[in-house]
């Protein structure tokens, strides 16, 4: 889903969703000395907040895509964080 995002921004190292999920959980576990269940819960809360603040743009016929594809970028980031959430739940 976020492969187009990765193609457009190759110069940035983007973690895949599983790597990001693990990183968040390990950070909460290590930085706050939490057990695994609590660190997963904190990571889920964090990702839920990111998702809530990232709008999902629904293209319509009257909307003209801007030259940079900002709408596509936002949708890719939204999809990325949904995937991160799914990966955290699998851990």
Image (cartoon, grey):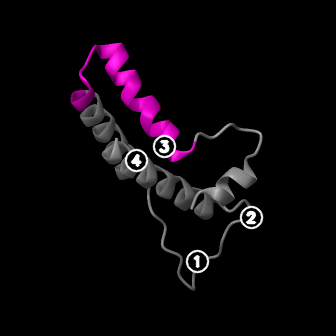
Residue at numbered disc 1 = 63
Residue at numbered disc 2 = 67
Left or right: 5, with 49 as reference point: right
- Measure how far apart labels 1 and 4 are at the Cα level: 33 Å
At x 47% / y 56%, what residue is drawn? 78
Which of 20 and 72 lies nearest the eye of the viewer?
20
Please report contact status of discs 4 and 3: CB closer than 8 Å, yes or no. Answer: yes
Magenta residue check for 32 = yes
Image quarter in which the C terminus is found: top left
Q: Position of residue 80 (x, y in %)?
A: 50, 52
Q: What is the total number of numbered labels drawn onto the structure image?
A: 4
Q: Position of residue 3 (x, y in %)?
A: 65, 57
Magenta residue check for 19 = yes
Q: Which mark identifies residue 87?
A: 4
- By secondary structure, the bulk of the magenta-drawn segment is best described as helix
Pick out the residue farthest to the front: 91
- Measure how far apart labels 4 and 3 are at the Cα level: 5 Å
Which of 25 and 62 lies nearest the eye of the viewer?
25
Question: Which span is picked out in magenta?
Answer: 16-38
């Amino acid at each position: 889903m976020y492969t187009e995002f990765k193609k457009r921004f190759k110069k940035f190292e983007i973690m895949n969703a599983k790597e990001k999920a693990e990183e968040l959980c390990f950070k909460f576990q290590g930085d706050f000395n939490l057990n695994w269940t609590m660190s997963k819960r904190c990571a889920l809360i964090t990702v839920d907040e990111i998702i809530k603040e990232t709008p999902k743009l629904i293209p319509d016929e009257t909307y003209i895509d801007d030259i940079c594809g900002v709408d596509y970028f936002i949708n890719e980031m939204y999809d990325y964080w949904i995937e991160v959430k799914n990966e955290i739940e699998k851990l």
